[in-house]
Image: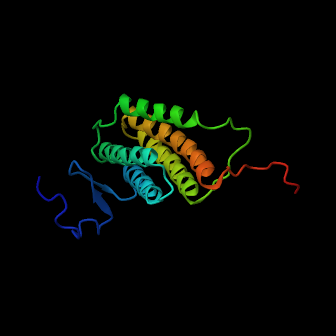
Amino acid sequence: MGNRLSKIVTRTGDDGSTGLADGSRVPKESARIEACGTVDELNSALGVLLASPALPAPMAAQLLEIQHDLFDVGGELAIPGSVVIHAQQVEALEALVENWNAQLPPLREFVLPGGGGAAASCHMARSICRRAERRCWTLSRLEPVGPQALRYLNRLSDLLFVLSRVLARLNSGSEVMWRRDRGR
């Protein structure tokens, strides 16, 4: 394969438009670009999480695979009408959620984001994932979006919530729980 990005500065976006992977141009503030950009932001947040030395090796390997999947989600969004995410990828996330969650005690209260650096980074990625899902749903109201990509983002936010709980327990010994009775 040749160079994919041999020229970085093109000046083609100086008019407020950007190119999709199919060659078409859309406004930079379009719903499609908002969705693409938020998925990219999510992938970057996972990169920050992966930079943590506190991640167990199996979790890091799973998150790296998820980063590849998020590139696939971005590819779907960048080529209108394409389908890259399939049910098997969604099912794989569901299995990861079940596997990691089986190690945790049941929740009796809401969890506050925190619990150590890795857990906090995971919570940040989770909240960005929720926004990415919302942006993709906004786009889906205007143009077709693959249903498995939407499901994938929904399951991924569930997984990131569970992983943040696991990381809080591994790195700080406990989770930070919301105290509704904190005496205001």
From the viewer's side, name the closer residue of 8 and 57. Answer: 57
Locate residue 114: give its quadrant. bottom right
Assign the C terminus to one quadrant of the image: bottom right
Quick check: 84 left or right of 133? left
From the viewer's side, name the closer residue of 170 and 153. Answer: 170
Percent x, y of residue 26: 31, 54
Residue beneath the point at 16% across and 65% down = 6
Tally of marks: 0
Judged from this view, the residue extending furthest toward the right is: 183
Percent x, y of residue 181: 85, 49
Q: Is residue 108 above or below residue 113?
A: above
Locate residue 50: give its quadrant. bottom left
What's the colour scheme?
rainbow
Judged from this view, the residue extending furthest toward the left is: 2
Percent x, y of residue 69: 35, 43
Q: Is residue 84 above or below residue 111?
A: above
Residue beneath the point at 19% across and 61% down = 5
Residue beneath the point at 54% across and 39% down = 158
Residue beneath the point at 63% across and 54% down = 113
Percent x, y of residue 81: 28, 37
From the viewer's side, name the closer residue of 140 and 118. Answer: 118
Quick check: 7 left or right of 156? left
Quick check: 94 left or right of 177? left
